[in-house]
């Protein structure tokens, strides 16, 4: 279970890095930098809920 969590965390970090790099390449990051934290926080809290739900089923 711990290995799956690490893999998902790494994939999420890579995905966010790719998205932010793409936004920076098209010069959209400066315009929307205030909104970058919203999807990151949403994904974090969703991940916490999923972890709690699946850890209770064991």
Image: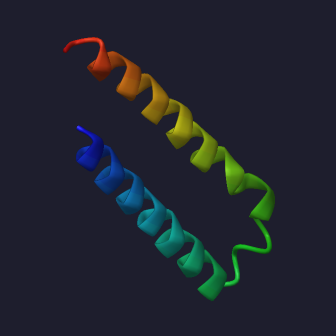
The residue located at (48%, 74%) in the rendering is 18
Q: Quadrant of the N terminus?
A: top left
The residue most toward the left is: 58
Q: How is the image coloured?
A: rainbow
Left or right? Give the position of 23 relative to 16: right
Expressed as whole percent of the image width and height from the top left, the position of residue 11 reads: 36, 61
Please name the residue shown 80% across and 57% down the image. 34
Position of residue 20 measured from the top left corner of the image (x, y, whole percent): 59, 72
> In the visual, does 7 lie left or right of 25?
left
Identify the image quadrant of residue 53. top left
- Which residue is more in the foreground, 25 or 16? 16
Q: Is residue 26 left or right of residue 31?
A: left
- The spot of residue 14 in percent (x, y) is 43, 68
Expressed as whole percent of the image width and height from the top left, the position of residue 9 reads 40, 53
Most extreme residue toward the front, as rendered? 2
Q: Nearer the viewer, residue 5 or 12?
A: 5
Which residue extends farthest bottom?
25
Residue toward you, 15 or 51: 51
Q: Residue at x 51, y 63 (%)?
A: 16
Position of residue 24 relative to residue 8, above or below, is below
From this view, report whether residue 24 is shown above or below residue 12: below
Determine whether 23 is above or below 1 in the image.
below
Residue 38 figure quarter:
top right
Which quarter of the image is occupied by the C terminus? top left
* Closer to the camera in the image, 26 or 54: 54
Q: How many marks?
A: 0
């Amino acid at each position: 279970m711990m290995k799956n969590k690490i893999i998902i965390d790494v994939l999420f970090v890579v995905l966010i890095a790719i998205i932010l790099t793409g936004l920076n390449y098209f010069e959209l990051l400066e315009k929307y930098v205030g909104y970058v934290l919203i999807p990151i926080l949403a994904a974090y809290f969703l991940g916490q809920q999923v972890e709690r739900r699946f850890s209770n089923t064991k």
